[in-house]
Image: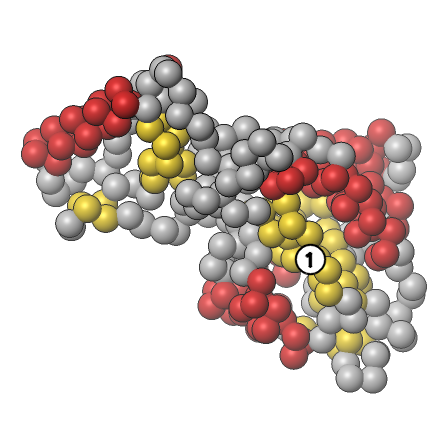
Amino acid sequence: MDVTSMNAAARKVKILFLAANPSDTMRLRLDQEVRSIDQALRQAEYREAFDLEQHWAVRAADLQGLLLRTRPDIVHFSGHGSDAGELMLEDPNGNASVVSQDALSTLFSFLKDNIRVVVLNACYSASQAESIARQIDCVIGMSDEMGDQAAIAFSAAFYQAIAYGRDIGTAFGLARNQVSLEGLADADANAPQLLASKSDPAQIILVSAVTAPSSNNPSGVAAETATAGVVVQDVQARDIHIGDTFVDRRIIVNLGPEGMNQFIDELAARLRADPVSYTHLTLPTSDLV
C-alpha cells in the first residue's frame, strides 16, 4: 500500500474548495456543502492533518492564481455544469460563464504540482473529469444531475473517509453508499464517477498515523522507537535519482538504526549488481512502521 507523502515535515493536506453559483442559475446550497465537509474533517481521526481553503464566486481569471498560490493536494469544485459537460463559473457581472473542457484540462497539465485528487461536484461533469484524469491521478465527476442533499452527503462522507486514513477508492465507495443510506434517489447515488487512468485509487492514502500531525507530534514525522523501523512513502511524479539510477519514487522518511543499516546494505548491493536496470527496493513488510 502506497502512502502519499506530504514530505518529511508532513505538511498538511490542503483542500482547495472552489464555489461558483452565478446569479442567473438555480441557487445551490454550497455553503451547507462546505460546512459539512469542514465538520467531517474536524470530527475525524486525523483532523489536524487537513487545511480547508475556500474561495467563492470564482471566475475563470481566478483559477491560475489560486492553483499557483495554494498548491493544493485536492481541488474541489462545487457549482453548476452545462449540458455539454462544461463547468459554469462567474463573469465580472456575476452571471454564468462556461469554461471549455480543453482549457481546464490544459490548466491542470501545467499546474498539477501536488494535486492528487480533483472533485467536480457539478451536474454532467463526468466528461470534464475524464479529460482532467489524463493529467491527475484521481478525478470525480457526475454523469447526470445530482440534487443538493445528495451532493452534500456525498462530499461529507468522502472527506470523512479520507480523514480517517482510508484510500481514495474506499472513500469514493463510502460516499456513494452514504447517498443510498440516506434514502436518496438511486440516480443520485449512481451519478458520481471515479476516473483514474494514471493510478490505482485503492493505493492512494493521503494521510495515515505515520504522516498525520497531532498535538503531541506537530511535525507528523514518525518518532524513532527502540525497535528497527522504516517508513517508505510514495511521492507520485517526484522521481528520486542516485547518480543515474532511478529509485522508484520512494523516500525514506524515518529509520531506526537497524532499518537504516539494512536499507543502505541492500541499496548498495542492488546498485553494484545492476546499476542500469535497478528500479525497486523492497524491505520486508515486518520492518514497516
- For disc 1, the neighbor class at 10 Å (few under 14, some 14 to 19, many from 20) is some
Query: Dot 1 corresponds to which residue?
Result: 53
**Amino acid at circle 1:** Glu
Residue at the far bottom in the pictured view:
93
Residue 179: image x %, image y %? 82, 36
Residue 49: image x %, image y %? 61, 41
Position of 261 with respect to 151 (left or right) is left
- Looking at the picture, tell me which residue is in the foreground, 187 or 232: 232
Which quadrant holds the N terminus?
Answer: top left
Placement of 220 over or under 19, stated as above or below: above
Which quadrant holds the C terminus?
Answer: top left
Residue 240: image x %, image y %? 28, 48
Position of 178 with respect to 102 (left or right) is right
Indicate the secondary structure of the residue bearing disc 1: strand
> Does residue 22 appear in the picture of this structure?
yes
Q: Residue at x 40, y 20 (%)?
A: 225
Q: Residue at x 56, y 67 (%)?
A: 69
- Looking at the picture, tell me which residue is in the foreground, 264 or 203: 264
- Give residue 90's quadrant in the image: bottom right
Residue at the far left in the pictured view:
272
Residue 50: image x %, image y %? 63, 45
- Looking at the picture, tell me which residue is in the foreground, 134 or 217: 217
- Give residue 158's quadrant in the image: top right
Position of 190 with respect to 269 (left or right) is right
Q: How many marks?
A: 1
Q: Residue at x 55, y 39 (%)?
A: 218
Residue at the far front in the pictured view:
216
Placement of 220 over or under 18, stated as above or below: above
